[in-house]
Structure formats: structure tokens, C-alpha cells
Image (cartoon, helix red, strand yellow):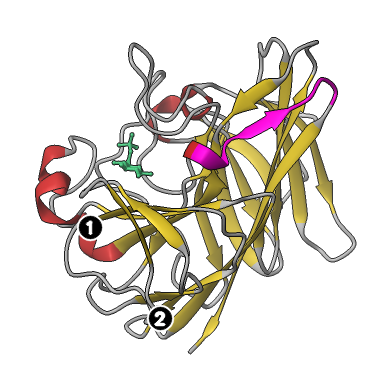
Amino acid sequence: MSAHPLEIPGHLTLTTGEGGLPKIRIESAFSRAEIYLHGAHVSHFQKHGEPPLLFMSAASEFAAGKPIRGGVPVIFPWFGPRDGYPAHGFARTTEWELVTTALLPNEAFQLVLHLPNSTGYQVEFVMTVGDQLSMELGVTNTSEQPFTFENCLHTYFHVRSISDISITGLSNVGYHDRIADVVTTEGHEPIRFEGEMDRVYFNTSATTEIVDPGLGRKIRIAKSGSQSTVVWNPWIAKSIRMPDFGDEEYIRMVCVESGNVADDQVTLSPGDRAVLAVVLSSESL
Ligand code: BG6
């Protein structure tokens, strides 16, 4: 079989992943990553000498029309349920087109994917894999009317134990508690987990950090073009209800999601472009 023209031999290869879905494997000087064209979905990122940064469910489906559970689902053009339509939009279940690949001067690898068959807007996703994982979701309004959408990089992080981690960066930020369905304000203390959590923090562009003493690691989530941060852990009962998620997997994951949802949704004038950018980095505690 001849190599795909966008492959970079020994470093960026197109292969077949779970469920027979096309997958890109990247080996950089600093890290390894795997990206499915299905959903433009980063399913794996691991710096050399560190445990995986991203959580992937062992129960995930890998099939046309189904979202992958774990990694970084790309949520667009709506967040959450929508009557008669798939939850969290269709971007995460669409096979994206690989457009370009490159080796950058800093030895990171970059790839660009396009969301196909879009009418009235264009969406591209740029991923850079090096010492950090950078992701940029760009949306351009190519129509003659305003275009309104929600977006989110619904990132699942791998942690040692949900009961031991804390999240900083959201002190005094307002949030919608989707479980109690109330709007309230975060306190001064770092966020800790003692049960199911599903919160949409709004009007915040703050950098957050996940402090994980069990893995001896701190993960930093820096973002721009994002006014919402969603923090989610399904805990026990919801884990059992989810068919594509292990009953006890909630212990080893937390979602800290960067995007623009609900009242933070984006409206683009004709010709305008918005970029949601997230940089994930990590260091020892
Ligand atoms: C989170 C939502 O972002 O995604 C939760 O806040 C939801 O309410 C979770 O349960 C997972 O959604 P899905 O569609 O991937 O099961």
C-alpha cells in the first residue's frame, strides 16, 4: 500500500483505528497523539515520561453516527440536547477531511481538518502536537445572514482519583448548575468532587488547572475565544446509565470543557470568523 500524500514518514501516519475508522498517529519528539477523522477527535495525547493526558472509555463505541466517549469531542453547532437532533451537534459524528499536515520549526506536528458539506459557514480544526496539545476551532460565516452557534472542546482528562483532585481558576465565576437547575456563583476554594457535577461556568476566559496529587501532575487549560467552561463528572448513577461508559470509569476522569454555550453562544456577521483556541500543558507537582 502506498503512503498517503499527507503522511510524514515515521512521524505522522494514517492508519486504521477501532471500528475500522481512519486514524492519524503522531510521534513527535515530545509526545504521542492519535486523532480520528470521525469527529476530528483527539483520542490520545501523552507526553514522553507521563501518563496519558486524556481519558478514553474502554466502553466507547467507534462507529459511524456514534460519538467517541473520551478524548476531545468537538461540539458544534449546538451544545447539549436538541429536540429531534443529536445531542451536542453533528460535528462529533461527522468524518472530517484532512487538509494539510506540517512539521513546524519547534518540532511540533500540525494538522488541519475541515468539516465537510457545510452550507453557510466553514469550519476548520487545527491541532498542534508537541510538548503541548493545541487545538483551534475556526468558524467562518460564509452566508449573507448572521450565523449563531455554540461550540465546545469537550475534553476528558485522565486523573488518578476524582475524589482527590481539585480544579482552580474559577473562583467567583457564575455558573449554571445543570443538575439543580440553579444559577449561582463559585466560592473561593478550589473545586472538589463529592458527587455528580454538571456546571456551565459563564462569562469566563480564565485559565484553569487540574491538580492531581495521585498522578503527581498539574494540567493547565489555557483558552481564548471562549467564554464558557463546563465541568462535568457523571459520578455513580449516571455512569451506570451511560451504555458507552464503564460503571467505575467516573473515578479516573474529569471533563473541563472550553467553549461558548448557552448565553455565551457566538453570533457572526457575514464574512466574520471566530476561533476557539485551547492549549493543554502539564507539569509535575
Ligand atoms: C457534558 C454535559 O458537557 O456532556 C452533560 O454538561 C452531558 O450534561 C455530558 O451528560 C455528556 O454528554 P454526551 O451526549 O456525550 O453523553
Q: Is residue 79 magenta?
A: no
**Magenta stretch, residue numbers:** 263-271
Whether residue 157 is visible to the viewer of this picture, yes or no, is yes
Horizontal placement of 29 versus 219: left or right?
right
* Residue 141, x across and y down, in percent: 76, 22
Q: Of circles 1 and 2, which is in front?
A: 2
Amino acid bearing label 1: Tyr
SS assignment at label 2: loop
**Picture residue at 35% right of the left edge, 69% below the top:** 159
Tell me: residue 165, above or below residue 39: below
Task: Indicate which disc, 1 or 2, sits on the residue closer to the N terminus.
Answer: 2
Q: Is mark 2 within 8 Å of ligand 1?
A: no
Horizontal placement of 111 versus 50: left or right?
right
* Residue 218, x across and y down, in percent: 49, 79
Given residues 9 and 126, the one toward you in this image is 126
Report the residue marked by disc 2: 188
Q: Which disc number belongs to residue 250?
A: 1
Given residues 39 and 45, the one toward you in this image is 39
Dot 1: within a 10 Å radius of its alpha carbon, few (fewer than 14), some, or many (20 or more) residues? many
* Residue 19, x across and y down, in percent: 38, 28
Ligand 1 position by quadrant: top left
Q: Is residue 269 magenta?
A: yes
Q: Which disc number belongs to residue 51?
A: none
Count of residue discs: 2
* Residue 139, x across and y down, in percent: 72, 31
Whether residue 261 is visible to the viewer of this picture, yes or no, is no
**Picture residue at 56% right of the left edge, 22% below the top:** 95
**Picture residue at 28% right of the left edge, 64% below the top:** 252
Amino acid bearing label 2: His
**Picture residue at 51% right of the left edge, 73% below the top:** 169
SS assignment at label 1: helix
